[in-house]
Image: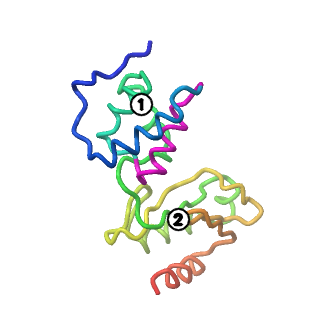
């Protein structure tokens, strides 16, 4: 059963954040199955989905806060905190695992000093797992923002990282 969030209990949200959420929801909320597109739109607009926005999204979508939170927490793609300036996605699918992704994962985590879903202390990189990049012929694969990289080795990652820091 759908239940609207109580408007009186909405938390204070910065006006720019409120405006972004309302713009996204206004354009999509009347479509069937609109919650996922709305969440993608909010994350695209803000870089993440602040927890303070959940009640507003719930109200605009005529859903409970639990419904909205449940979808956000179920899908690893959605984040409630800002990501680093660059997001690194490491493929963890079977083909990449068979071609050395486990060793690459360990190396990348060590080099960045973060685990999956973590952001480096300087805010430069967020590391995310992904379960197929569709680049199986070039395993192991990594994507940085929208740039796909294949046949990646620890040395190749180090070379990429050095070029990024220059």
Of residue 158 and residue 126, the one placed in the foreground of this image is 126
Q: Residues within 10 Å of mark 2 (few under 14, many from 20)?
A: many
Q: Secondary structure at mark 2?
A: helix
CA distance for labels 2 and 1 = 31 Å
Query: Does 43 lie within the magenta span?
Result: yes
Residue name at image x 31 percent, y 41 percent: 51
Query: Does 94 lie within the magenta span?
Result: no
Residue name at image x 36 percent, y 47 percent: 80
Left or right: where does residue 9 sit relative to residue 96?
left
Of residue 113 and residue 125, the one placed in the foreground of this image is 125
Where in the figure is residue 116, as x and y percent of width and height? 44, 57
First of labels 2, 1 by sequence position: 1
Of residue 145 and residue 100, the one placed in the foreground of this image is 145
The residue furthest bottom is: 166
The residue range painted magenta reads 32-48
Placement of 43 over or under 126, stated as above or below = above
Identify the main secondary structure in magenta.
Answer: helix
Q: Residue 142 occupies which quadrant of the picture?
A: bottom right
Where in the figure is residue 66, as x and y percent of width and height? 37, 26
Q: Residues within 10 Å of mark 1 (few under 14, many from 20)?
A: many
Judged by depth in the image, the label closer to the viewer, 2 or 1, is: 1
Where in the figure is residue 157, as x and y percent of width and height? 56, 76
Where in the figure is residue 47, as x and y percent of width and height? 43, 54
The residue where tag 1 is placed is: 68
The residue where tag 2 is placed is: 105
Q: Residue 102 occupies which quadrant of the picture?
A: bottom right
Q: What mark, if any, has residue 127 been given in the picture?
A: none
């Amino acid at each position: 059963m759908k239940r609207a969030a109580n408007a009186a209990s909405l938390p204070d949200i910065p006006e720019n954040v409120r405006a972004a959420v309302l713009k996204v929801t206004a354009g999509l909320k009347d479509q069937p199955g609109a919650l996922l597109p709305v969440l993608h739109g909010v994350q695209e607009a803000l870089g993440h989905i602040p927890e303070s926005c959940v009640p507003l999204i719930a109200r605009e979508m005529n859903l409970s806060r639990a419904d909205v939170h449940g979808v956000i927490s179920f899908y690893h793609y959605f984040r409630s905190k800002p990501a680093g300036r660059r997001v690194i996605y490491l493929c963890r699918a079977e083909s990449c695992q068979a071609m050395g992704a486990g060793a690459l994962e360990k190396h990348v985590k060590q080099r960045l000093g973060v685990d999956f879903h973590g952001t480096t202390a300087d805010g430069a990189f967020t590391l995310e797992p992904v379960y197929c990049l569709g680049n199986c012929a070039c395993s192991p694969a990594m994507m940085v923002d929208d740039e796909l990289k294949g046949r990646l080795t620890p040395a190749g990652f180090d070379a990429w990282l050095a070029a990024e820091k220059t």
